[in-house]
Amino acid sequence: MSLYISSLNSGSNGNCYYIGNQNEAVLIDAGLSCRETELRVARSGLSFSMIKAVFISHEHSDHTRGIAVISRKYQIPVYITEDTHRSGRLRLPNHLARHFDSYSPISIGGLTVNAFPKQHDASEPHSFTVTGNKITVGVLTDIGTACEHVKLNFSKCHAAFLEANYDEDMLENGRYPIYLKKRISSDQGHLSNRQALELFITQKSDFMSHVLLSHLSQDNNNPRLVETLFRTHAGGTHVAIASRYQESAVYHITGELVEKDHDAPAILPANYIQISLF
């Protein structure tokens, strides 16, 4: 009863999240180059050969930049909505492009991926939960407001990558032009620290062991500020920041709350060790 998770990168410069069991894994989004994704997977002690599918949340380049090369090089299927595929003008091999619908679960070996709609300024945006070994992990980023779909699915998670994009005061008083401030803070933009914390406090399950605060703005947020804010309300849930500069630790999600230091990487099963990536 466990899953292994890692943020390979999280931010406007690229988003990519790894979720797997002992036999297979999926990527949610592929916003890094293929080469950089390979390097980060290898540094984490994970194996690219275990990645059996990539799921794309929406067409923005910080979520799709590496997908064409990754899918071709490794012959990995890409699950994407039809509108997202068309709007993103993504050059995917026809035999590897798989279109999905909301709330139509997709089985990838022992993993089940469920997509649900969200509000964001994209053609057909979705977030995902990944379930395996009776553990559910959510990837909830690029969300303008916590709609009922987001609330329902967040409440099911043992762990989640949760967007906390901006501090409202920093955005209001920052250097961004007015139109961009309005776009970010709109119901089609991103979740603020306050909005993310409200979702966390009101919808978090008693069994949520880890939350990785994700997609932090480089200009309008402060990792220490938001981490401290969440830890004040975390209870037994470990709070970490998904960096925009490097991969996170690999976290072992077992369905049980862990008493103390969650910052050390998980001890991985032997078949996770990358012997030769290239």
Image (spheres, grey):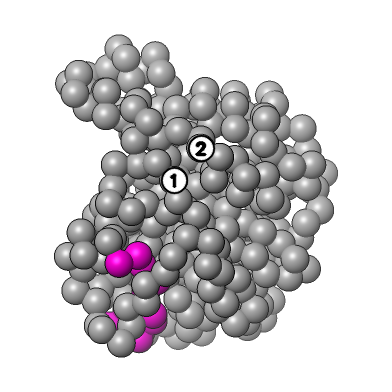
Q: Foreground: 76 or 259? A: 76
Q: Residue at x 32, y 14 (%)?
A: 172
Residue type indicated by callout 1: Lys
Question: What residue would you read off at disc 1?
Answer: 118
Q: Earlier in the sequence, mark 1 or mark 2?
A: 1
Is residue 94 at all visible to an observer of this figure?
Answer: yes
| Left-right relation of 128 to 201 | left
Q: In which quadrant is the N terminus drawn?
A: bottom right
Which label is found at residue 250?
none
Q: x and y percent of residue 216 in the render?
A: 41, 36
Labels 1 and 2 touching (C-beta < 8 A):
yes
Residue designated by label 2: 147
- The x and y percentages for residue 42 are 46, 72
Distance of mark 1 from mark 2, alpha carbons?
7 Å
Q: Is residue 76 magenta?
A: yes
Side of 25 where 178 appears, left or right: left
Q: Residue at x 54, y 43 (%)?
A: 150
Q: Is residue 51 above or below residue 183?
A: below
Residue 33 makes an appearance in the image: no
Residue 173, magenta (yes or no): no
Residues shaded magenta: 71-82
Crowding near pointer 2: few (<14 within 10 Å), some, many (20+)?
Answer: some
Q: Which quarter of the image is occupied by the C terminus?
A: bottom left
